[in-house]
């Protein structure tokens, strides 16, 4: 027990929890205050620098060893006695205590305080071997503002400077995503002030926001008359490689902080287990925090208003009268049939749905290669998982739609930018439960003792080694491999390295590599989904002119202004159809009735229009002109579509979704193209999320949840099934570990 306590304390310390009121820190475990700085941050010695005080020059002398400030002395004869002189007396001790010049000014003598701080910073810069910047930087004191487009909208930045230094960097307005751009802003702005530099590395995973902020601050410095090239000192390393391997211990070790990882971590912690989450990226949330937050679940209450048309009945009847491919399939079909007959007998006019039908569509939509038992476990639990998420604070729109490639109207739309409505509540609950989430900590090997997985070996950003030992189990929640160019092409040779992906850079299949190295089996690795409607060029998911993920009120046309596909088709069929179109680029078209100020990623629609990413015109003819489509083509396509909506039938492509006609201007067109999105295959697991070996036996101590696992989505994942899968199996993994 004592050992565990000591270990946990060290974990808390490593994660910075004890210093921050037990909030998980999204920072690498070894930070300046917690771990010894590497030899060589400072050249030991005594350094002196000056700055302009209130009544004259203030001089600060610091004495350092390789890693610490040992002594600090300030002098400023010209400072007012009883006012500035207080800062001269008090601040040096504070600087030594904080081991940093980043200390608060003494109230009532701000100018003298700032001069002491600035001189101390300059002295420390000398100790780090940097050129004194103050000589080169000459600015007109004041506050300067600039604007740059970030990831979601414009960043408005205000920079306050004095003659030679950056006093503050504030982003006064932005719409960047929580955990991603927002976090990058916080860290970069702080480093710019602390280290008096524009030369701060972009945060991987939030590069666009990072670069926008740096560009805006650079503009402000120029505006102030400063020379940005004189503010280019590199940020010194905030930690260093430790000689020893650090050992940490908890009941459950979770690898990956996306939806599956956080769902597992929170469930385990709610069940009373001690948990550590490790995340290799500097930012948490994985692909889940970047997703469109479409969530499938049969939900009779929410679906009550949706009509059951004849075409939809035909779809059910076809699926329950096929020749089954296995006994499990036959049982599932029989269960759907029984529910469907019950439904017909009830006389209900509302849309038919139930977990069994969701499961059968998931199995069929993946070409019947998925694991029926796994799929059934999934479909039976998704509504419960959604309710759990709602209890944690997730909010959903009051309307069910049919996500792109979802095949049925059971898609709930989370009402928050991107995936923040899922990751946010889980993160907040993890904070509440004191679960450390250690970023920049990459797991690279499973630790096995007597045939059981007992921990994970990991490496931090400085190359220090860690062993995270698990009393009860290790959950791999490392996501997919869409951004591992070799691996994805190994399994699907058509996916060449030049192809873009919707994924974050950390989606490289590490969990699969680690688990197969100890004998885990995989399934369906060759099934990799390409998302049909991403941003051309970048492959990003975002950019569309509407909030709902569903295509219920949208048509998709080619450059000739014509529909070419059934918009509610499977994603693979959709992609194949897009590839046949001119330049492989298409437009999704909607009218103004479904346009709100922002889309589901938090992007401002009008800004996207201004930037030329979305086209907008009062009339369809106007859109045709902007897009260079043949005159009258789009008008004719929309007229035909509106007639289909009236008749609830699409004689050309067999669309089944007919919510509303497209008729109220202005009209919007968003260019779209395919992008590599989801790896359906992965580790073979059983319905309890235990990882199986080659002979189908569970590997003791090892669990997998989310995109790292295979067997649910077959050859083709239904839109809206991923968030539901990752959150549900994260919970299942934790419950299995807890024995619940
Ligand atoms: P899922 O949807 O299955 O939860 P995500 O992509 O949302 O998947 O999250 C997976 C997370 O796992 C990502 O944040 C990713 O950076 C992280 N990850 C991947 N490989 C490792 C690793 N080797 N060590 C720690 N974290 C990892």
Image (tube, rainbow, N blue to C red):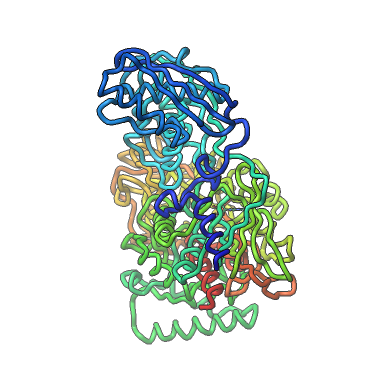
In front here: 676 or 234?
234
Place of residue 707 in the rendered image (x, y in percent of width and height, measured from the top left):
57, 60
Q: Is residue 56 above or below residue 354?
A: above
The structure residue drawn at horizontal position 53% and vertical position 57%, both measured from the top left corner, is: 277
Residue 474 point in image, percent of width and height? 60, 65
Residue drawn at (41%, 66%) of the image? 409
Give the quarter of the image for residue 363.
bottom right
- In the rendered image of this protein, does residue 455 appear above or below residue 74? below
Q: Is residue 613 left or right of residue 373?
A: left
Ligand 1: give its quadrant: bottom right
Quadrant in which the N terminus is drawn: bottom right
Q: Is residue 580 visible?
A: no
Q: Is residue 374 or residue 93 the one in the foreground?
A: 93
Q: Is residue 399 above or below residue 336?
A: above
Residue 151 quadrant: top left
Q: Position of residue 471 (x, y in %)?
A: 60, 68
Q: Is residue 264 above or below residue 215?
A: below
Tell me where residue 657 appears, x and y as whole percent: 41, 62
Of 466 and 591, the residue lying toward us: 466
> Is residue 545 shown left or right of residue 109?
right
């Amino acid at each position: 027990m004592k050992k565990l306590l000591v270990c946990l304390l060290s974990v808390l310390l490593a994660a910075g929890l004890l210093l921050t009121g037990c909030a998980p820190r999204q920072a690498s475990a070894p930070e300046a205050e917690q771990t010894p700085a590497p030899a060589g941050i400072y050249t030991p010695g005594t350094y002196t620098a000056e700055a302009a005080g209130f009544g004259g020059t203030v001089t600060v002398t610091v004495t350092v060893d390789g890693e610490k400030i040992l002594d600090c002395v300030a002098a400023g004869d010209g400072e007012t006695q009883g006012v500035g002189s207080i800062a001269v007396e008090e601040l040096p001790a504070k600087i030594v205590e904080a081991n940093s010049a980043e200390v608060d000014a003494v109230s009532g003598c701000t100018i003298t305080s700032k001069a002491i701080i600035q001189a101390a910073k300059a002295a420390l810069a000398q100790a780090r071997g940097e050129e004194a910047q103050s000589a080169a930087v000459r600015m007109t004191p004041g506050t300067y503002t600039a604007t740059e487009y970030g990831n979601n909208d414009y960043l408005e930045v205000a920079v306050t400077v004095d003659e030679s230094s950056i006093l503050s960097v504030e982003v006064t307005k932005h719409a960047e995503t929580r955990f991603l751009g927002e976090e990058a802003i916080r860290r970069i702005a702080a480093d710019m002030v602390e280290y008096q530099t524009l030369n701060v590395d972009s945060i991987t995973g939030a590069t666009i926001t990072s670069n926008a902020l740096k560009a805006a601050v650079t503009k402000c410095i120029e505006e102030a008359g400063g020379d940005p090239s004189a503010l280019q000192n590199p940020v010194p390393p905030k930690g260093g490689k430790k000689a020893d391997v650090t050992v940490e211990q908890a009941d459950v070790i979770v690898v990956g902080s996306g939806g599956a990882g956080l769902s597992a971590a929170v469930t385990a912690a709610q069940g009373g287990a001690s948990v550590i989450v490790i995340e290799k990226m500097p930012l948490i949330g994985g692909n889940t925090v970047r997703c469109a937050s479409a969530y499938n679940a049969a939900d009779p209450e929410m679906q009550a208003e949706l009509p059951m048309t004849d075409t939809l009945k035909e779809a059910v009847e076809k699926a329950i009268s096929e020749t089954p491919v296995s006994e499990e399939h036959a049982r599932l079909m029989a269960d759907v049939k029984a529910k469907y007959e019950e439904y017909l007998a009830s006389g209900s006019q509302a849309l038919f749905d139930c977990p069994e039908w969701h499961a059968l569509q998931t199995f069929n939509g993946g070409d019947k290669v998925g694991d029926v038992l796994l799929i059934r476990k999934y479909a039976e639990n998704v509504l419960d998982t959604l309710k759990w998420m709602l209890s944690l604070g997730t909010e959903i729109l009051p309307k069910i739609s049919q996500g792109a490639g979802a095949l049925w109207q059971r898609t709930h739309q989370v009402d928050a930018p991107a995936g923040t409505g899922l990751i946010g509540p889980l993160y907040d609950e993890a904070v509440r439960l004191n679960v450390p989430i250690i970023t920049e900590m990459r797991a690279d090997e499973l630790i096995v003792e007597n045939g059981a997985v007992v921990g994970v070996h990991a490496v931090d950003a400085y190359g220090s080694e860690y062993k995270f030992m698990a009393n009860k189990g290790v959950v791999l929640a490392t996501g997919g491999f869409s951004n591992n160019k070799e691996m994805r092409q190994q399994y699907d040779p058509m996916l060449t390295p030049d192809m873009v992906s919707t994924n974050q850079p950390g989606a490289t299949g590490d969990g699969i590599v680690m688990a197969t190295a100890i004998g885990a089996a995989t399934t369906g690795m060759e099934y990799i989904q390409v998302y049909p409607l991403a941003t051309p060029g970048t492959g990003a998911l975002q950019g569309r002119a509407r909030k709902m993920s569903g295509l219920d009120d949208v048509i998709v046309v080619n450059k000739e202004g014509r529909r070419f596909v059934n918009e509610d088709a499977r994603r693979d069929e959709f992609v194949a159809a897009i590839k046949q179109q001119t330049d492989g680029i298409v437009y999704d078209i909607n009218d103004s009735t479904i346009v709100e100020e922002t889309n589901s990623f938090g992007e401002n629609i009008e800004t996207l229009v201004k930037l030329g990413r979305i086209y907008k015109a009062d009339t369809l003819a106007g859109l045709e002109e902007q897009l260079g489509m043949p005159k009258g083509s789009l008008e004719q396509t929309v007229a035909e579509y509106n007639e289909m909506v009236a008749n609830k039938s699409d004689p050309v492509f067999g669309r089944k979704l007919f919510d509303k006609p497209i008729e109220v201007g202005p009209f919007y067109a968003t260019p779209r193209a395919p992008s590599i999105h989801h790896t359906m295959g992965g580790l073979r697991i059983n319905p309890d999320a235990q990882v199986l070996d080659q002979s189908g036996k569970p590997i003791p101590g090892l669990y997998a949840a989310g995109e790292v696992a295979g067997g649910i989505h077959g050859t083709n994942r239904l839109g809206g099934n991923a968030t539901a899968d990752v959150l549900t199996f994260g919970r299942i993994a934790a419950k299995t570990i807890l024995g619940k």
